[in-house]
Amino acid sequence: MEATERRRVAAKRVRAAEDAVEQLKEGLAGRGVTLPSLRVDPVSCAGNEPTPLVDLGRCNIDTALRLCEVLAEKESGHGE
């Protein structure tokens, strides 16, 4: 694969990760959960062939418990 094609593929991967982060932010916000450190991990985007990772980040205990509630609601079918 030539350099131009590698850059195009890399940019596509990073955009997909950025889109995933935005979807997560919107979906979680709709359930009353905010992960303040949610982002694309910049280190995973480095190099010629990046494999972007979504960094869910750190949150306080209240946010972690709220996320547990949301997951339990979804599992029980009450969060729809």
Image: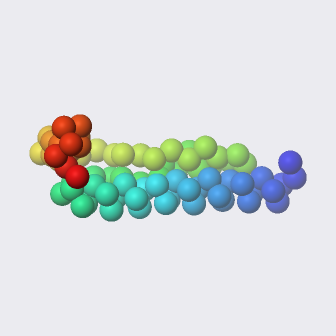
Res. 31 image quadrant = bottom left
Provide residue 51's location: percent of width, then percent of height.
Answer: 61, 43
Q: In this figure, which colouring scheme has been used for the structure?
A: rainbow
In this view of the protein, which residue sits in the foreground, 23 or 17? 23
Question: Residue reaching furthest right?
Answer: 2
Provide residue 30's location: percent of width, then percent of height.
Answer: 24, 61
Provide residue 29's location: percent of width, then percent of height.
Answer: 25, 60
Q: Is residue 65 left or right of residue 50?
A: left
Q: Residue at x 72, y 48 (%)?
A: 48
Res. 4 image quadrant = bottom right
Q: How many marks?
A: 0
Work out whether residue 36 can be spotted. Answer: no
Q: Residue at x 23, y 37 (%)?
A: 75
In this view of the protein, which residue sits in the foreground, 57 or 70? 70
Q: Residue at x 87, y 52 (%)?
A: 2
Work out whether residue 44 can be spotted. Answer: yes
The answer to whether residue 27 is above or below residue 72 is below
Q: Is residue 25 left or right of residue 60?
A: right
In this view of the protein, which residue sits in the foreground, 23 or 73? 73
Q: Residue at x 51, y 44 (%)?
A: 53
Q: Is residue 66 left or right of residue 46?
A: left
Provide residue 25's location: percent of width, then percent of height.
Answer: 34, 59
